[in-house]
Amino acid sequence: ASCARFRFRVRAMQATSLSRSPARTFIRQLRKDGSHAPLSRGTPAQPSRVSKFGLRARGANRENAAAQETKEPKTTVQVDLGARSYPIYIGPGLLANGDMLCKHIPGTSALVVTNETIAPYYLARTVKSLSSTGEIRVEVVVLPDGEEYKTVEVLMKIYDKALESKLDRQTTFVALGGGVIGDMTGFAASSYQRGVHFLQIPTTVMSMVDSSVGGKTGVNHPSGKNMIGAFYQPRCVLIDTDTLASLPDREFLSGLAEVVKYGLIRDRAFFEWQEKNIESIIARDESAIIYAIEKSCLNKAQVVSLDEREGGMRATLNLGHTFGHAIETGLGYGKWLHGEAVSVGIVMAAHLSHRMGWIDSNIYERVATLLDRCSLPTSVPSEMTTEIFLQLMAVDKKTKDGQLNLVLLKGDLGSCRFTSSFDRDALEDTLDHFCPKLRHEQQSKNMV
């Protein structure tokens, strides 16, 4: 059934004006006739060559054509949490599969939360699928795009729309976007009327391989990243790999830091596969991308199933994140992408691990080399100093009873430890290795 057959109100609620934005133009078109013409944001990378995987990025062979026709997942990963278990559907064209999406919505209403960047591309398609059974009333709220808007103030826009639309406890919040949208929508779902249903439709590599899986939700505080939030699992995760076509190269590459992480902490074979196939992933080869997403989701699903609320094992998924979150907070949210900061954090964690004699130099070099091949940063930004790192790491969520805990590599490739038993002097040596000296010390030398 067409969106035009259903009456729903759409209002873009933002902290900044959208009067001339693509999202506002899109909303006007959607309100008028239930459809829209995609707005141009430049030509996304679309590799045309056929790799050894035998697939182009789009429309290359019969298998791909069949997937587009049937709109069935190429693969499904299950997150095993007993009565709260849920599937992760992975494949191209899945946004058009309304039946698969709607079967995870138990009530008769849904609120789609997205941002002004994603809305012109995928909002109408999502609304059409949700409306396809004729049984679901769809509401929409469009937020501003960016990590700097992952705040309590912007979060209120979701509650405002839900209350304005008189949505009850049987409604379902649908996150359509990257990690920021997923985290905020999940947190809103966990707290609206003390908990409503929740679906994830991630549209970035980062959210597909990491943030959409496992139920971590929340918003940032000026003093720390993701300091306000909850564990709240979705009813399903729908990964339509076609949505990566609109993802800029910088954001695409940023998400690869999390893919590299899984190989380092628990899956040696996956890391070695990445070393051999990273160029195919960067070229957006469909088969390589689907495999990388599937393996990443499998690794995370296994960890979450064993340790949902991060009592121990799940903390290992934070390799590089303590250093990375300090960079994001120290620079100001949105200056560096999350994956860029995590990339540097992984290299710093590997350096510390090597300095303590926990891994050999070959592993450290392989880590830095693979991240460099992903065109990700491996050096600390000049604004950061040892003192800034130590100050921000002291309020990290993994600090317990005043003791800083870190995820470090130990032993063979694919092994790690979450521990507070590390050499503090070695930590400061690593920070000094990567960071410039304090500015006032430099200024003093200049004055002399």
Image (spheres, rainbow, N blue to C red):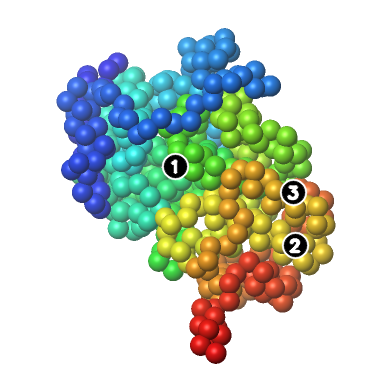
Task: Name the residue carrying label 2.
Answer: 353
- Residue at disc 2, secondary structure: helix
Select label 3 or label 2 by which is in front: 3
Task: Name the residue carrying label 1.
Answer: 178
Camera-side residue of 356 and 362: 362
Q: Are marks 3 and 2 in contact (CB under 8 Å)?
A: no
Q: Quadrant of the N terminus?
A: top left
Q: Amino acid at mark 3?
A: Arg
Query: Of callouts 1 and 3, which one flags the residue occurring earlier in the amino acid sequence?
Result: 1
Which disc number belongs to residue 187? Answer: none
Task: Name the residue carrying label 3.
Answer: 366
Select label 2 or label 1 by which is in front: 2
Report if residue 401 is visible in the image: no
Measured in 3D between alpha carbons, the distance from the residue under mark 3 to the one under mark 2, in whole angstroms, is: 14 Å
For mark 2, does the 10 Å Cα neighbourhood hold few (<14), some (14 to 19), or many (20 or more) residues?
A: many
Q: Residue at x 32, y 35 (%)?
A: 119
Select label 1 or label 3 by which is in front: 3
Report if residue 93 is visible in the image: yes
